[in-house]
Image (cartoon, helix red, strand yellow):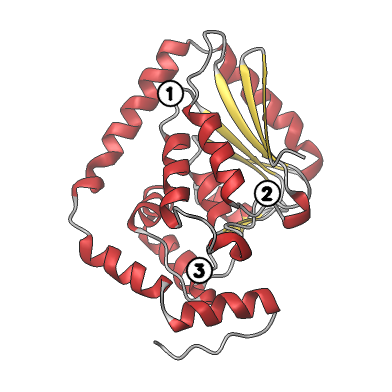
Amino acid sequence: MEKIVVEVQGAVRSVLLNRPEKRNALDADMLDGLLAAFRRPPAPGERVAVIRAAGPVFCAGLDLRARKEMTGGASSIEETLHAIETYPLPVVAVVQGDAIAGGNELALHCDIVIASSAARFGMSLAQIGLAPTWFLTKKLLEVAGPVVTRQILLLGEPLPATRLHALGIIAELAAPAELERRAGAILERLAANAPLSLKAMKATILREMQYRDGIAHADIDAMVTAASRSADAREGMAARLEKRRANFQGK
């Protein structure tokens, strides 16, 4: 079974996360599949791309069991998310269930997020001894602002989609039974718009938000790396997989 299913139907490129038995946790194959899907330039007739997920969970983040086997580590997900963010046409995320850690970032790197009112968004990295990179934190600050970013990162608890919609962090909210109908209407609207206008508008927005990329952050990268390689990180990930409370020692 393919973990990433890509189909083009008329003006819409559909990308499906297809690992529901693992809550669509991202392993190396899925990151490679997503990267390939969004590095491939759109055909002349394409107008919009959409990311959906099979099963009740949108994406539980990076697969902790497969994380050690990922040759790129955190940079692999950064490369994948950058390809989604810079894809020349609008990318829509249809979030039917929880989007946690890397799943939260995957959704927020899309141009428009349409979420079920039953969904939750969050970054649980502090609970397992990890920290998001500069690139991933920058995206949270861009869409959520510093107050909500602190809450999401420091507490590590998921927030309901209803709150994120009220704060303007996600664009659309729908009852579970209405999610696909609402998503279809938005995709139809995007597909009917002028493609050159869509490309120009998306490129303009991206360029104007890139000023943070020039800020020196080597010291921050070192802190994130130290956290990811710490005994606490090993303990945190083991505790999450073993479904027990972590015993952090600060080293």
SS under mark 2: loop
Q: Which image quarter is the N terminus in? A: top right
Separation of residues labelled 3 and 1 (CA atoms): 30 Å
How far across and how far down the image is residue 169, in percent? 50, 48
Q: Disc 3 marks which residue?
A: 125
What residue is at 49 percent from the left and 34 percent from the top? 111
Compare residues 22 and 110 and report the one nearer the observer.
22
Question: Crowding near pointer 2: few (<14 within 10 Å), some, many (20+)?
Answer: many
Whether residue 98 sits left or right of residue 82 in the image: it is: right
Question: At label 1, which amino acid type do we have?
Answer: Pro
How far across and how far down the image is residue 107, in percent? 55, 45
How far across and how far down the image is residue 112, in percent? 53, 35
What residue is at 78 percent from the left and 47 percent from the top? 55
Q: Badges 2 and 3: C-beta atoms under 8 Å apart? A: no
SS under mark 3: helix
**Residue 58 circle label:** 2
Please identify the quarter of the rendering in which residue 50 is found: top right
Whether residue 63 sits left or right of residue 212 in the image: it is: right
Q: Which image quarter is the C terminus in? A: bottom left
How far across and how far down the image is residue 157, in percent? 57, 69
Q: Disc 1 marks which residue?
A: 88
